[in-house]
Image (cartoon, rainbow, N blue to C red):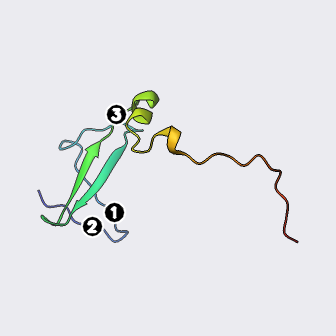
Amino acid sequence: MVIKLDAKRRLTVPASLAPTRPGDVFEANFDTDEDTIVFRRLARKGDWLAILEQCPVAMDDLPPRRREIFRSKL
């Protein structure tokens, strides 16, 4: 199916092609090799602990906080 942009630069997908509900969230990725935009429906209720575990930076790698009170240089 070919989808075109309207005057306000919006994409419209027929409801029969992709049934959705209010509040659905999608991730959009542009594939430069195929020159296409891919939409993926994200889970409605994500497990925040599982998302935190997938974080590429370990929480132990964060720099330590300064213990000094902020003082203006003025």
Amino acid type at image mark 2: Leu
Inter-mark Cα distance, 3 to 1? 23 Å
Whichever of labels 2 and 3 marks the residue nearer the N terminus, that label is: 2
In the foreground, 10 or 26:
26
| Figure check: 11 above or below 64 | below
Residue type of the residue flagged with mark 1: Arg
| Quarter of the view holding residue 5 | bottom left
Q: Secondary structure at mark 1?
A: loop
Q: Nearer the viewer, mark 3 or mark 1?
A: 3
Residue 5 vertical placement versus 54 (above, below): below
Q: Position of residue 29 (x, y in %)?
A: 27, 56
Residue 24: which disc? none
**Residue 43: image tag:** 3
Tag 1 near tag 2, CB within 8 Å? yes
Which residue is pictured at 37% across the width and 39% down the height?
24
Residue that appears at 34% across and 71% down? 7
Q: Quadrant of residue 28?
A: bottom left
In the picture, measured across the screen, residue 13 lies left or right of residue 33, that is: right
Question: Which residue has dot 2 on it?
Answer: 5
Q: Where 73 sits versus 60, above or below?
A: below
The residue closer to the viewer here, 70 or 10, is 70
Residue 22 placed where, x, y %?
40, 38
Work out which quarter of the rendered image holds the C terminus and state it.
Answer: bottom right
Point 68% across, 46% down: residue: 65
Mark before the other along the chain sequence, 1 or 2: 2
- Marks 1/2: CA–CA distance: 5 Å
Residue under numbered circle 1: 10
Q: Residues within 10 Å of mark 2 (few under 14, many from 20)?
A: few
